[in-house]
Image (cartoon, rainbow, N blue to C red):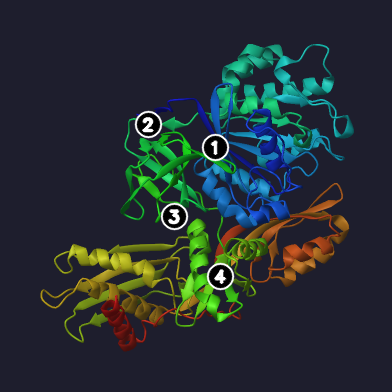
Amino acid sequence: METMASKPIRNIGIFAHVDAGKTTTTEQILYRSGRIRSLGSVDAGTAQTDFLEVERSRGISVRAAATRFSWQGVTVNLVDTPGHVDFLSEVERSLRVMDGAVLILSAVEGVQAQTEVIWHALRERNIPTLIYVNKMDRIGADPQGTLKQIRRLLSPQAAPVQAPIGAEDGFGGAVSVLGLTPGDSEDAKGYLQLLEETVAEREESLLLQYLDNGTLPREELVQKLPALTQNGELFPVLFGASSKGMGIEPLIQAMVTLLPPPLAALNGPVSGVVFRMERDAAMGRVAYVRLYSGVLRNRDSVRNETQQLEEKITQIRKIDGQKAEDVGLLEAGDIAAVCGWNHARIGDIIGCADHVPGETRLAVPLLTVQVKWSNEAEYPAVVAALQELADEDPLLDLQWLQEQRELHLKVMGPIQIEVLTHVLNNRYGLKVDFGQPSVIYKETPAQMGEGFIAYTMPKPCWAILRFRIEPGERGSGLTYSSTVRSERLLERYQHEVARSVPEALQQGLFGWEVTDLKVTLIEGEHHVWHTHPLDFALATPMGIMDGLSHTGVKLLEPLLSFRLSIPEETGGKLMNELILMRGEFDTPVVRQERMEIEGTLPVATSLDFPARFGSLTKGRGALATFFAGYRECPPDVKAERVRRGVNPLDQAKYILAFRNALAGS
């Protein structure tokens, strides 16, 4: 049975497009709640939640930072997430453990590229969300225009619970629309009317009342707001100017009254998830855990379900930006940093998976880069450092080609490469360069075919397999099944085959991962005396590669869907560019001398497009891109990747390498 946590808690993520004022807002919240005594600044590099050296020097957040404060008896765990698209994986991991969100927009720039990516992710997970329109004091702040844009691009269920007083230099804060008096401005009454209409549309009895009276009773509104917000039927909009500390207290008030408490099963089995990893000079690896069920204490031995091992907790800490205290206890519903787990990685399920929500995939690394080191002596240190960083960010997916002495990483974009360079230098004292990013292609079978392997020599061994391989729908990944009866091939051997198929598909004929296919085991045979369980782990890749050599493969390339808004006069030039990049797009829409174009672009041809876009539009364009999946490459595109290890098509050599590896391990 899920109940509320034992003490009032809120787990809230702060999300925004880069530069909307997210870290400044977090800083003000900590200050106003009495959590910190003096205000830090992003520009001066003294913000509480920006503690990586690179964050302070660049003024951007690249890691989700957890901090906490109390307000009117409620403890709030606040996670400030990065706004830059290259760090989307951090955002994605934070989303999984949040019960509520504050999405910050700038009153000047309005809804931006990243705002929409985050919004879609918040909606996919149905996380109750407050929208905070910041920078109301800046030149060009347009609250009504921003509100219209929010309702058009994000949701028509977004409605103001405040009315701003003035804007730009004359911004005087915001008042609650629930406390308006007859003397208030027509503007303010317009904001109230918008809220009443939006609430009335959610319930028939309210709609009839609204149509009869032209208004709704205040008590009714006050009573309905929390439930509507928590069910994701209403998204309250608030206004402020965080750099001046205006609008912060009403925002905190809304966070504790409108966003939901966590559901938690205190008496249930331990069930939680690691959502970020950190290094601490004194304590080593620190795992941030959100606990959904049960209780953890110092010195408990806890099962890591993902890695199938048990590890002991040395210390449980509550973290505030850079400060930490040993609290020795983590209860369901809460978040804390756990020390002592040397094997933990991001995404690991702790205890059992019963209460842990699934994850959202937003970030798909589409580029791969090769790592270069300045002198040979540093090679082992570079490998060790990158393995540690890959534990903190599993999407880096470090590929270490030991024979070629090469290291490759998957990355989201150029800023991430810059940050990695910085971290390797600052944390590990290593000077590392990265090669030019190249695109990650995939392969898919060109037609249906069969793969066969009879691994019966040199004895003792016996594994006979026949696979049917057929193309699947785009985006379907791998579907595996077996039609072989267990008396022909024992269940345990069938499990070994099922486990080995995805591994065998990591490198196809051109060295890329093979995807969007159906693999069916249609024949299988073991031998009572000669079969060793590992024979099937060895035979499966040979059978699969044999099959791919018969079906042939098509290359797939990653696509981005894009939306851009540009001054009308630059439209012709930009459409030409899009065509040259093999882009496809719908008929442009013209709105108030601006042209909006939506379509898709191959990643391979548009690597430098975001950088060139600024000069093509004289800095007046807006570009949003999202990963849109993979599609077939044109026939003239060729891309091959160096294979790691021995090719299973060279069966004699492959068997030898596999057996040697077994003997050596």
| Mark 3 lies on residue | 345
In front of the other: label 2 or label 1? 2
Which quadrant of the figure has residue 457? bottom left
Query: Element type at marker 2?
Result: loop
Q: Position of residue 496 (x, y in %)?
A: 26, 66
Of 622 and 460, nearer the camera is 460
| Residue marked by disc 1 | 127
In the image, is residue 42 above or below residue 483? above
Q: Measured from the top left, where is residue 93 in percent x and y?
A: 52, 49
Task: Compare marks 4 and 2 and give the one earlier in the sequence.
Answer: 2
Q: Is residue 314 above or below residue 467?
A: above
Tell me which corner region of the image, top left, top right, bottom left or bottom right, holds residue 662: bottom left
Instruction: In this rendered view, identify the residue nearer to me: 468 or 331.
Output: 331
Residue depicted at x 56% and y 51%? 90
State the residue at coordinates (27%, 81%): 659
Q: How many marks?
A: 4
**Residue type at the position of mark 2:** Ala
Mark 4 to mark 2 CA distance (whole Å): 42 Å
Q: Earlier in the sequence, mark 3 or mark 1?
A: 1
Q: Is 369 rendered above or below residue 626?
A: below
Residue picked out by circle 4: 440
Q: Which of the two discs, 3 and 1, sits closer to the camera? A: 3
Identify the residue position indicated by label 2 in the image: 265
For marks 2 and 3, the one nearer the N-term is: 2
State which quarter of the image contains the C terminus. Answer: bottom left
Badge 1 amino acid:
Ile
The residue tagged with tag 4: helix, strand or loop?
loop
Question: What residue sits 32% from the left and 86% below the top?
Answer: 651
Q: Secondary structure at mark 3?
A: loop
Q: Residues within 10 Å of mark 3 (few under 14, many from 20)?
A: many
